[in-house]
Structure formats: structure tokens, C-alpha cells
Amino acid sequence: MTGEFDLCVVGGGPAGATLAGRCARLGHHVAVVEQHRFPRPHVGESLSPGVWPLLESLGVHERVAVAGFTRPVQARIRWRGDEERLPTGDGLTVDRGAFDAILLQHARDSGAVVLPPGVARRPVRAGDGWTVPLGDRVLHARFLADATGRRRLLGGRRCRTGPRTLALHGTWRGGPPPEGPQTCIDALAHGWLWGAHLPGGQIRTMAFVDPETLVAQGRDGERLYRRLLAASPLFADLLAGAQLAGRVQVCDATSYAAPTPVDPSSVKVGEAAFAIDPLSSSGVQTAIQTGLAAAAVVHSILEPDADTHAALQYYVDHQRYSVRRHAATAAGLYAEHRPHADAPFWRRRSAGAPPTPSPGPRAAPLADLLPLQVRLPATAALRDTPCLVGDRIELHRALSHPVLDRPVAFLGGSALAPLLDRLPAAPSLAAALRSWDRSLPSGHAREIAAWLHRRGLLEIVPVCLRRNDASRLLDTECIGRGFSHHKGIT
């Protein structure tokens, strides 16, 4: 039996379901191959508040909100030293089997064909697409997505982006919540602990350690796991009266990235593309984001007028930016832990922490710049950059500068480059804003100028270089009169 599809997604977790559902809604014929029958058990139950806007954009916000998942009333954290009790905001603890089933059902409702559970054997490139063996069935697809997580169906190299880390986890039953559902995080000398009440009354606890710590315990995962939990007063409270149900599992939790996450006929999403440090509790959120980004890439490539190069570059840029941002954030959080800062576990993970920015000279208020002529710094540039516009990847000129994490093409929905092109001809910033106002919604011109000013991207043009009615001196005349010290003159 055979099937012809535009896209075959192997893996029905959050990344794969998101990609499949979005591409199906964009009119593509999509198949999803998942080896397990849903709902299937899965760890990684803690969702950060940032997941809600993504769920709303997917159209599953209400389904998740009424699914009976747990909203912890507080987080007990011992990280910097003394215990802190913090509100959890809109964070959520879910049954991952049920949560993932909601996303996969949404993909089905969107038009994706979710095939009966089956294990896809290694796909084979065939002509301008792929052949995917699936039991007695063979699928043909123009594009293939690997959403198989750390199993990584398509294989290939992966590069570590953080120290090797193991996760030891188990499920506990019994012991009513002492103060309602809560999340606990505790930092120990050789690792850190996470625990939370799950929907249905169970408790999940996880310990994150260096592999050497497990080796020192004779590779006895349960022994190490129990020893770490016993060292924490927070977890003594969390697990009071509870009994361990089943075996303690040990799995890899190392962060990494695939050097080549996309090519003209395949893409890796979720943890097949990259994995982040578990400290962020945003693995599901990141997986959904990769699915959305990949959907725009696949849609752009499958369209007749595709700019394949721009689409591929967009996804590579998206992956590298995400990896850098998550690595820096995790390192900064590890660096906040002081009690065991010199221990190998903490020293390795805080090594990449970004330096604390030193306060620079206080900038003049934006109002002071209005009567002056301004320009971009010499270190800024406007370059063609792949951008997400609607559901497509397109090239647009974007502003690049060392203070920006990545190039910026749009602010508040307005293209930035055409506005910046007008700066050199404007005799003052006020005149530039009046020019921008003619093409922008009310108030946007001032907001964009304020955004540029806060980042130091508006530079006052030296008097000798201004081309307005008050001053028409030539550059060479300025230099000859001793103005060569002005910034921007070489």
C-alpha cells in the first residue's frame, strides 16, 4: 500500500503535531507517522507561562485550559541560598500524554492524516522526495520532517552546546499536597532537583547531575536518586508520606544542536534539531516554536515561486539564535547559584554566563535629539535578511548591529529599512519623524525612534557634516579645521 503526500512528519509530539497542523491548514497534504498510541506516557510536564501565546496562536488554548491540568499555587525554590516562595504565574503542570494528544488531535482536525501507530524505518531519498517504509506500507513525500526527538530518525552529527547531563526521574504516589499543588526546585552541591504535583495526584521528581556523579555511585541510579532527594528539606516536605512507584529512570538531558537542521527536502524539528538545558522548563514551548518556524519554511519551499535559499537560511538562523539565547540564559541562571559555585557541576554550567553590563554614559533624552540631525552608527548596516512575513519566508532589508541579538526588519508591523533610508536627508530627527508619520499609524514614528534611541542606534551628526541650510561645510573643510576627533570621521 502506498500514499503520496506533500509532507511526511515522523513523530507526533508537540513539534511534529504543530508542524503538521500548520502545513495542513496552509493547504498541503500531510501525513503524520507516530510509533506510539496516544496518549502515551512522557516526561517533561512543566510548562512555563510563555507557552500560552503559542497555544492561542495554534487554536488549542481553550482545550488545554479546560483539560484539568494542574496550576501550581506556588514554587518553593532554594537556589541562591535561603528558600524562596514565589508565585508561579500562569505556569502549568500537565499530563504530557494528554497534552500531546490535544496537539495531535488538533493536527488531525486541521486536515493532517494521522496514520495508525507504526515504526517508520529509515527514510530513503527518492528522486525529488522521500520514500518512508512503514510496515507493509510505503509513503512517498516531497518533504520529510524528523520530529523523533533525541532518537533522531535522520541521524547526522550533533554538537553539544552544554556539559553532559543526566536526568534521574521517578513517580511517587500518596501523600496529599500540604499546601495545594506546588513546584519545588533545590540546588545541591552535585546537581539540582525539580519536583511537582501532577494531574491525578502523582508527584514527579527529577535530579540533574553530571555522569561522573552516577559513576561514583556504581551506576546505581536509584541509590543516587534517593540520596539526592534525602539531602533536600524541600523534597522531604514534597514527598512526605509518598511511595516511589516503579523504577527510577535515567536518561540523557544534555543540550545539543544539529549542525545542519534543514536542507531543500527535509527539516529537523523539536529535539531532533536542538535540545536546551532543562533548567528553563521551556522544552515544550521551544518545540512548538520550531514546529511553527519549520511550517513557514516547508510552505515557502513547496510553493511554486519558492525562494529556497532564503527559507533554508531563515531556519538555520532561527535555530542558531534559539541555541545561543537558551545557552546564555541557562548559564546566567547557573551563575546565580552561590553556595556551591566552585563545585565542578556549577562551574561547568555557569562558564558561559553573559557578563553583567556596566552602566554607560547616560544618554540624552530623546526630546533633546529632535532638533538635531541624526544617523545610524558606522557599525550598523541594512542587509537583505530572510524574514517571516505571514506564512512565508521573504528577503527584506534588516538592521544589524552588535547590540542587537539578531537583525530587525520590522517594528510593530512596520518595515524599518525604508524609514532609516530617510534619515540622511532629514535636517533633524523631528523632520524625519514627520516624514515617517505620513506612512505609519499614529504614534508609531515616535515609538520607533525611542526604540532606536534606547539601544544607542541614533547618533548625532557632527555640526561640520550637516547638510541643512544652517551648515553646508564640506567634510574636507571640517577636517582641516580640527574636527577630526568627531565620531564617524575617518
Image (spheres, grey):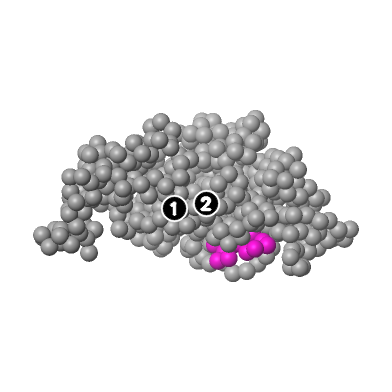
Residue 262 location (% of width, % of height): 61, 62
- Judged left or right of residue 471, residue 101 is right
For label 1, count other residues whose C-alpha is less than 10 Å away and answer few (under 14), some (14-19) or many (20+): many
Residue that carries the numbered disc 1 in the rendered image? 398
Q: Is mark 2 on a helix, strand or loop?
A: strand
The amino acid at mark 2 is: Cys
The quadrant of the picture occupied by the C terminus is bottom left
Residue 451, disc: none
Q: What residue sits 52% from the left and 47% below the top? A: 281
Magenta-span inclusion, residue 378: no
Residue 203 place in picture, x, y as percent: 60, 41
Indicate which disc residue 387 carries: 2
Q: Which region shows up in magenta?
A: 257-267
Which amino acid type is shown beneath numbered disc 1?
Answer: Ala
Q: In this view, does 55 lie to the left or right of 28?
A: left
In the displayed structure, does residue 351 sit left or right of residue 309?
Answer: left
